[in-house]
Amino acid sequence: EAGVTQFPSHSVIEKGQTVTLRCDPISGHDNLYWYRRVMGKEIKFLLHFVKESKQDESGMPNNRFLAERTGGTYSTLKVQPAELEDSGVYFCASSQDGMGSGYTFGSGTRLTVV
Amino acid sequence: AQSVSQHNHHVILSEAASLELGCNYSYGGTVNLFWYVQYPGQHLQLLLKYFSGDPLVKGIKGFEAEFIKSKFSFNLRKPSVQWSDTAEYFCAVTRSGGYQKVTFGTGTKLQVIP
C-alpha cells in the first residue's frame, strides 16, 4: 500500500511569494489532515477534511492559508502571500476512521520563507 | 483545550542504557494517548497507543508506556536502547469519543551513542 505522499519535500521562497503544497493521501482514506511544526515547537493541527468537505479548520492561522481537496482525493495547501513566520514543516496525514491511532503521516514539506 | 508537555527536549544515552521520556497532559476528561516517533529522514509513525484497559501499554521495538491517570502522565520507557532508536519522539493526546484532533507535545530528540 502506497503511503501518504507530499510534494515538494523542500521549498524555499521569498517573503510575499505564493507556495502551494500538495498531499496525496492513502487511496480510500476519507480523512485528511494538515499539521504544521514551527522550528522547535509542537506539531500543531491546521485542518481536517472528510472527503472534500472541511470538517474542522480551527487551526488555520489566518486567511493567507487556503486548503482545498477537490474531488476528495489529493489536497493542496496554498500560502499567499508567504511571511517569514510561515516557515516550518507542514505534515499531511490521512486515516479511514478519523481517530489519531489510524493516522498515516507523510514525510512533510519543509517550507523556508526568506 | 488539552495540552501536552514533554519535559526533556534532548536526551543523550549510551547504548544499553534505560530510557524514560516524560509526558504530561492537561485535560479533565477521558483521553486517548499516543507516542509517535520520527526517525531521521522518515515520516512520523505510531509507536504505541492507549485507549482503555491495562494502563501499561506495549508498543513496537520494545517500547512501553504507562498511563497514570492521577498524575496525568504517559511516560515512555525502554529497558535498553539501541543506536537505531535515535529519533524524535512525540507524545500526543486526543479526547475520547469520535473524531478528535490530535494535540502533540514539543517532541524529545533522543540520541543514542554507540
Image (cartoon, coloured by chain):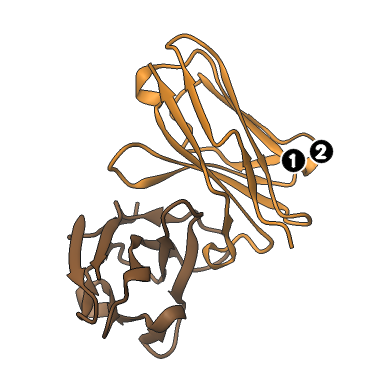
Residue at 22% in and 68% down:
B22
Q: Which residue is mark 2?
A: A71
Which residue lies most toward the right here? Answer: A71
Percent across and percent down for residue B91 are 35, 63
Res A68 seen here? yes
- Residue A59 is left or right of residue A48, and the answer is left
Residue type at numbered disc 2: Gly
Q: In the rendered image, what is the letter of the chain coloured orange?
A: A
Q: Which residue is mark 1?
A: A52
Labels 2 & 1 near each other (Cβ < 8 A): yes
Residue at 29% in and 51% down:
B106
Residue type at numbered disc 1: Glu
Q: Residues within 10 Å of mark 2 (few under 14, many from 20)?
A: few
Which residue lies most toward the top here? Answer: A16
Secondary element at image label 2: helix
Q: Chain of mark 2?
A: A
Up the image or down, A99 lies above or below B52; here it is above
Res B68 seen here? no
Q: Earlier in the sequence, mark 2 or mark 1?
A: 1
- Residue A52 is left or right of residue A32, and the answer is right
Q: Residues within 10 Å of mark 1 (few under 14, many from 20)?
A: some
**Spatial CA span between label 2 and label 1:** 6 Å
Location of the C terminus of chain A (image quadrant): top left
Task: Tell me the colour chain B is drawn in.
Answer: brown
